[in-house]
Image (cartoon, grey):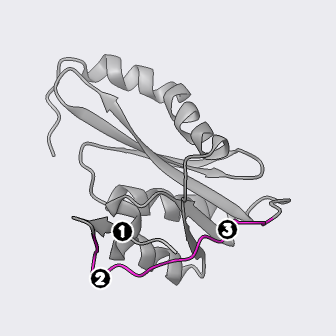
Amino acid sequence: MLACVRGGKKHPQHKIYPYLLRDLTIDRPNQVWCVGITYIPMRRGFLYLVAIMDWYSRKELSWRLSNSMEANFCVEALREAIDRNGKPEIMNSDQGSQFTGFEWTQALKDADVKISPLVHVNMRCRAVHGRQRSLDPLSSLQAATAGQRTTG
């Protein structure tokens, strides 16, 4: 089982969740979703893109941009994905602070979604990052904001 580790020790407020995908046959939509964040370099600083994808269909379910790494933009994307597509049985994510903190884990618990940490980078969730880079609004956004300052 895995936990968020800070300085070699488990964060005292973060629960340890088991990896639920081992030996699981993923054979239908909304069985497992995965989520990832990617950095978009701007002229001054970064924007952060979170994308949620259905593991089986590889469909992008929701995404959000933010100029900070706070968890709220991830939770907004999660709520939109659930509103549009129903809820998954399992959410698979890395162990970044956005996905191990109270706001994210509570949103999943409130929706009755099981939490599974990403044990290692895999090809299916790498597709999230590849698709994040191909979203049409990004090129427009980068062009429109190229000379603007981003704030945190």
Position of residue 149 in the picture relative to residue 91 (left or right): left
Q: 4 left or right of 120? A: left
Q: Report the Cα–Cα distance between label 2 and label 3.
A: 25 Å
Q: Residue at x 58, y 33 (%)?
A: 131
**Lower position in the chain sequence, tag 1 or tag 3:** 1
Instruction: Give the percent coordinates (x, y) of residue 90.
Output: 64, 70
Amino acid carrying mark 1 in the image: Cys
Q: Which residue is mark 2?
A: 13
- Tag 2: amino acid: Gln
* Callout 3 crowding tier (Cα within 10 Å): few <14, some 14–19, many ≥20: many
- Picture quadrant of residue 31: bottom right
Q: Earlier in the sequence, mark 2 or mark 1?
A: 1
Residue at 28%, 75% (x, y): give it: 11
Query: Is disc 1 placed on a helix, strand or loop?
Result: loop
Viewer-proximal residue among 76 and 101: 101
Residue 55 position, x and y percent, is: 70, 52
Q: CA distance from mark 1 to mark 3?
A: 23 Å
* Pointer 2 local density, CA inside 10 Å: few below 14, some 14–19, many at least 20: few
Q: Which residue is mark 3?
A: 88
Q: Are marks 2 and 3 in contact (CB under 8 Å)?
A: no
| Residue that carries the numbered disc 1 in the rendered image | 4
Question: Which residue is painted at 36% across and 56% down in the image?
Answer: 73
**Residue 18 in the image, given as x and y percentages of width and height:** 57, 76
Q: Quadrant location of residue 151?
A: top left
Instruction: Kindly state the secondary structure of the residue where label 3 is placed.
Output: loop
Q: In the visual, does 2 lie left or right of 131?
A: left
The range drawn in magenta is 9-24
Is residue 80 or residue 110 the one in the foreground?
A: 110
